[in-house]
Image (cartoon, coloured by chain):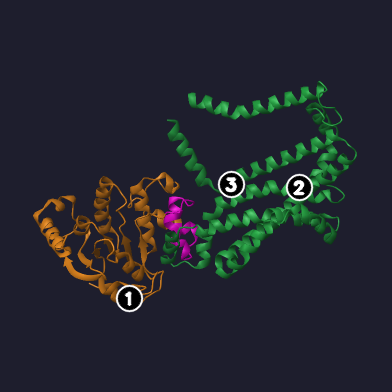
Amino acid sequence: MDTKLTAEGISKSYGTTKILDSVSIELRDRELVSLLGVSGAGKTTLFNVISGLMEPDCGHVFLKGQEITGNAGHIAYMLQKDLLLPYRTVVDNTALPLILHGVPKKEAREQASAHFAEFGLDGTQKKWPAQLSGGMRQRAALLRTYLSSEGVALLDEPFSALDTITKDAMHTWYLNVMQKIELSTLFITHDIDEAILLSDRIYILAGKPGKIIAELPVNVPKPRTREFTLTDEFLQYKRKIISLLRL
Amino acid sequence: MHRKLQSITDKLSPVFLILIVLIVWQSVVSLGVVPNFMLPSPVQVVEAFVDDFSSLMENAATSLQETFWGMLIAITLAFGSAYLMDRFRLVKKSLYPILILTQTVPTVAIAPLLVLWFGYDMSPKIILVVISCYFPIAVGLLNGFTSADPDVINLMRTMGSSRWQIFCHVKMPYSLSNFFSGLRISVSYSVIGAVVAEWLGGNSGLGVYMTRVRKSYAYDRMFAVILLVSVISLVLMKLVDVLQRVCMPWEQNCREETSESTCQ
């Protein structure tokens, strides 16, 4: 498989506090890789570096072989907050990245609308974000992320603000939609179950400063279903991760 | 049903209060408690308004023109300076304190100077309108620009947007409600600003009319013109509300939704 995204030897300090110590990760084509770690391990800092919003002290970020260190605008990015703009309709929100790249408004709307059914948003085109449920808003944000990506997306705890039932439904939907769309995803989470259920590989980030302490492939074929979380295999992965994190 | 009744009484109660005040006013004058040459009765005020209607309208047209040009210039200046203050930290650091300082200068005091410098035509009036209207709009806009969610701005950066695109797609729309709050205050200042400037000299305008009727002790007309100034201010404020509703349809929608859900 092709490598889409590489981060090599990323280190970052705030003042005298070192947050990240020589972190290297790799994301291959159409892979979903989780970055699992306790709060304060530097996950969000790493994401800010990879997305180009922040310059690392040392290290490099490559997208499809090209260096993009400290250069925002190449990798799509989504946070826990949906950050939909309240003054744009849902379709205009999702079409925003296309419009920013110079696609004419009408065409951008059509392109965005074409994905609405797949993202479970049909019929919400002309609504305001405030009129959608939490799950729908998150899906709209995900569609916007997808449309702004050059095939690579960073998701920073995208489902953690949702209630448990909505979150479960989102996982099922996400596993499903990932089969249809071409997206390589780097996924931040502190939820071990979520990481095992969704990922092809899991990086475990721990310590102060944060380091990658383990890389764990999840060798279970996709599409996976919710049932997977009840199997012994799942529990074995979970035990291993817990022991690695020394919880 | 109960709620509806409540809202009707809420809306009618100020009307009742005004009616009571008018009745008391009328009877105080009719019963001769206050001499009539000092205080005209409401009926006399209305009569004066009707009698002098065409003259009032002519003068109002002048004042409204001054208000309009003054507001237009004030809004333009406010946009320009708020943009620069948001864009360049140094501009904000140096300009903002001076702007606050100018607010402490009473406009009534500079009006005579403006007339001295710019003569008796419209320009000193327009300048006074600009001076009194600029500040609330500029501050509203600046607060709006700087209050945009930094996460949204980061998100826009990851989408590869330029500074200008961030301004147009995020900062501008985010500042709209602040802008309209500023505009609502300014619009009420603007008419008063124009009238005050007209007191000090000019050929037509509601302020000129006011000075004229005051000098001839026509207090009924004085009250009529005060009434007109108030009405104009109220109409302009209402106009701002309508404009805001048109420019910010999403707010309207949320309000409807919430009021519906609380009604049920």
Q: What x and y, as percent, mark residue B101?
A: 66, 60
**Label 3 with label 1: CB-CB less than 8 Å:** no
Of circles 3 and 1, which is in front?
Answer: 3
The residue lying toward the viewer, choosing from A221 and B121, is B121
Both marks 3 and 2 on one chain? yes
Label 1 chain ID: A
Q: Which residue is mark 2?
A: B64
Name the residue tied to disc 1.
A62
In the rendered image of this protein, does residue A245 appear above or below residue B196?
below
Quickly name the residue at label 3.
Answer: B244
Tell me whether marks 3 and 1 sit on the same chain. no
> Label 1 neighbourhood size at 10 Å, few (<14), some (14-19), many (20+)?
some
Q: Amino acid at mark 1?
A: Phe
Q: Which residues are magenta?
A: A84-108
| Residue A200 point in image, percent of width and height | 20, 63
Describe residue B160's horizontal placement relative to residue B84 as left or right. Answer: left
Q: Farthest residue to the right: give it.
A: B216
Q: Give the overall secondary structure of the magenta segment.
A: helix
Q: Is residue B227 above or below residue A83?
A: above
Whether residue B172 can be seen here: no
What type is the residue that disc 2 sits on? Leu
Other-residue count near label 2 (Cα within 10 Å), few / some / many at <14 / 14–19 / ≥20: some
Residue at the far front: name it.
B33
Q: Quadrant of residue B144?
A: bottom right
In space, the residues marked 3 and 2 are separated at their CA atoms by 21 Å
Location of the N terminus of chain A by quadrant is bottom left
Q: Which chain is orange?
A: A
Rendered-image quadrant of the C terminus of chain A: bottom left
Residue under the point 32% across and 61% down:
A155
Distance (Cα) linking label 1 and label 2: 62 Å
Q: Is residue B221 left or right of residue A185?
A: right
